[in-house]
Image (tube, coloured by chain):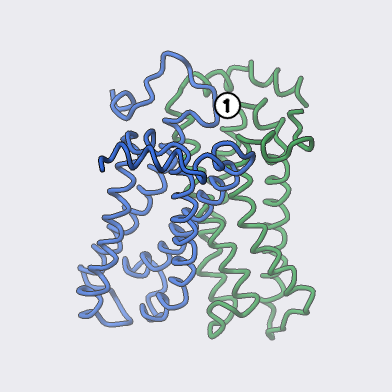
Chain colours: A blue, B green
Amino acid sequence: MSVESVLESIQTSALGVWMRDTLPAMQVVEATHVLAAVVVLGTVLIVDLRLLGLADSSRGLTRISRETLPLTWIAFAIAVVTGSLMFTTSAEVYFANPAFRLKAIALLAAGLNMVLFQLVTARGIADTGAPPRSARIAGLLSVLLWTAVVLLGRWIGFTKGYDFTIPPDVDLTIAGALM
Amino acid sequence: MRPFAEWLSGTYPSVAIQTTFWFIRLLQATHLVTAGIACVSGIMLALRALEWHRADQPFPAVWQRYAPWLGLSLGVMVVTGVAQTLGDPVREFTATSYWVKLALVLISIAGTLALARTLRASPPVGLRPSAKLFAAALIVFWLAIVMLGRMIGYDLAIWGDLSLRT
């Protein structure tokens, strides 16, 4: 089974058709996706600022993670569900979109950074006090990657021309934007 | 409102924003990221008021942690929001979501300040049940602000006959 046929079967599925044809399903799902994504970013930032030593230095890292990350996971789960629903509407278009691919890479990198931090870096650092360099690097990477995820997500909207009139002579590809 | 919006869209600052295409992207992206920071900061303060977040810390300490981020991100949101409005006044002023969002921003700021005023009092006082209910409503308002921002582009689909674009 080729990638093209999988993508085609996704967007011709009953769910894909319903999402495309039912007002205001796509609009509500997209707004919810945006909300979930920025809540992920905002809550991750709370932990990252602690890792960077810019906030909460007297509060234990474990404690901050425990009181913040449940919200992150809830928002992340909502973002995954709503993102998947959005994908069903135009799977082929999304898959071919450079901004979508870059977002997927940034998302994977952010997840990998999180896993590496939990399994390797976090084991060797003290819970309170100034964070070591490894924790600062993990925190900085996390801030950059999650911000990239949100911005690239917004870029997908720009390249699909969702919400404002695009001048006909404007090249909406990333290559066009970088020229 | 529409005649005013149409006049505004022909003014020099509006045309300058409309014709600088990358600037609109930059404004929207910056607005979105700062909306996330403002939303989460506001929610964390409301959760603390409800004693569901950092209940072991006194409210003034939690306020000191989140209020600067809330204030700063709201400041950036106002600047980027005004510029976006100037860049496409007809789209913004004719959207019901835009006006509901603005109202909720004002209510949420005033509500957060009112909660903080009560909870930063010395000696510490507890919140009345009605104030706790309001703190819970503030969480919904902060979430709604972000969603409504995205819904401005889809006003007719979302609001139907209630859309100001009808």
Residue B100, percent from left and from top: 72, 45
Could you tell me the amino acid type at mark 1?
Gly
Tell me which corner region of the image, top left, top right, bottom left or bottom right, holds residue A118: bottom left
Chain letter of the residue beneath label 1 in the structure image: B
10 Å crowding of disc 1: few (<14), some (14-19), many (20+): many
Q: Is residue B15 left or right of residue A119?
A: right
Identified at 78% across, 38% down, the residue is B162
Identified at 44% across, 36% down, the residue is A90
Residue A16, percent from left and from top: 49, 42
Identified at 75% across, 35% down, the residue is B163
Relative height, residue A6 to residue A162 (above, below) = below
Relative height, residue B78 to residue A124 (above, below) = above
Choose between B52 and A119: the one closer to the eye: A119
Q: Can you say which quadrant of the picture contains the C terminus of chain B?
A: top right
Relative height, residue A67 to residue A103 (above, below) = below
Outermost residue toward the front? A1
Q: Is residue A28 left or right of residue A130?
A: right
Residue B153, percent from left and from top: 60, 34
**Disc 1 element:** helix
Q: What residue would you read off at disc 1? A: B87
